[in-house]
Image (cartoon, rainbow, N blue to C red):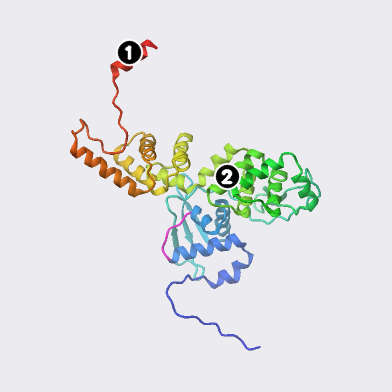
Amino acid sequence: MARVTIYRDNYADTTVVANCFIDDYMKDANDAQLKVYLYLLRMLSANQATSVSDIADKFNHTEKDVVRALKYWEKAGLLDLEYDAEKVLVGIHLRDLTVQNTKQGNIRLTSAAQPPVASTPVLAAQPVPASGLQGQFSPAVAVSPEDDTRVTEFVKPVYSADQLRAFKNREETAQLLFIAESYLGKPLSPSEIKSMLFFTDVLHFSEDLIDYLIQYCVDRGKKDFKYIEKVAVNWAESGITTPKQAQKASTRYDKNVYAIMNELGKSGAPTSKELEYITRWLKEYGFSMDIIFEACQRTVLATDKHRFEYADGILSSWKQADVHHKADILKMDELHQRRRSSGPRPAAANRFNQFPQNSYDFDTLERELRSN
């Protein structure tokens, strides 16, 4: 058979991949590692910033999958990871594979970049078949060649029809499946029911933790059970056994939380009280990020102290006013300005128009306190 000539049109929007990467590195990398490295090259060629969360969302991986891939390529010598004083990942240095000791590329991470988790050896563990429902599965163990550290790898077994039938006949299973179907809005397939069995039989998750697991993934728009399984395995590897632990761990990688913290001039992980405010704005109030950012920007202009309380006052008033879009806020501002121009000027002008003001009758309050 004759040789085939490969050619292409000339166009500028391209990403260059070194031949030595294809020849020497690509064959040993897994799916996630390849996607992450090629995407880094693409972002570098476009001179664009990215973050661990953005990469995870792009390829439907977890943040931990992305961090593992970055660690893999760092160990392979294709890139260097740069951290700040607080051990937060802030930069990725891509090495030039075509010429040694030449100019290197650099990828900038956005302010929403998340702190990396501990390095894990990249070793594939072989699945161990399970012959029964309880106590018959032994998680595979990988050994790091550097320090002989044993790392447990949780692998989903191949369940038989009898095992699946026994699981579905358990008294507590019906409630568990009902919860999952309620979140997903559809009946579970046999494959998805096997995943539920995996969560209880191998990962030993409680019903409350499985409830939180599925809710956590669905809230992020992830209803694919492959993604849900990845999150579950990451939690199991991290030793998470309760919803409270899962919530605390997940906030470290929630880019919205860190973006809001950044808008309010805060750095580092949020406190439990700060997280309570952010969760209220996102979940209870149901505000989009642009509206929350608007409240944060007005807060920063108005005060240097108690910013979460101040922002909460703004957003609470907008919730009561049934605000859904930034255009609604502009209408409120215009209405407030008209009222101010037509009525008497207040004694002290407030730099934020919608923040509720309170006028207290301190003599009456004092009498009430004494009477109580």
Disc 1 and disc 2 in contact, CB within 8 angstroms: no
Left or right of 73? Residue 107 is left
Q: Residues within 10 Å of mark 2 (few under 14, many from 20)?
A: many
x and y percent of residue 25 in the render?
59, 66
According to the picture, the residue beneath numbered tag 2 turns out to be 215
Q: Amino acid at mark 1?
A: Arg
Magenta-highlighted residues: 46-51
Q: Which mark is residue 367?
A: 1
Q: Is residue 349 above or below residue 219?
A: above
x and y percent of residue 54 in the render?
49, 55
Nearer-the-camera pick, 257 or 237: 257
In the displayed orientation, state which residue is furthest to the bottom. Answer: 2
Q: CA distance from mark 1 to mark 2?
A: 49 Å
Report if residue 239 is visible in the image: no
Q: Residues within 10 Å of mark 1 (few under 14, many from 20)?
A: few
x and y percent of residue 162 in the render?
80, 50
Q: Residue at x 76, y 43 (%)?
A: 169
Local SS, label 2: helix
Local SS, label 1: helix
Q: Which mark is residue 156?
A: none
Nearer-the-camera pick, 6 or 329: 329
Left or right of 197? Residue 106 is left
Task: First in sequence, mark 1 or 2: give its number.
Answer: 2
Q: Is residue 372 above or below residue 147?
A: above
Q: Amino acid at mark 2?
A: Gln
x and y percent of residue 361 in the render?
28, 20
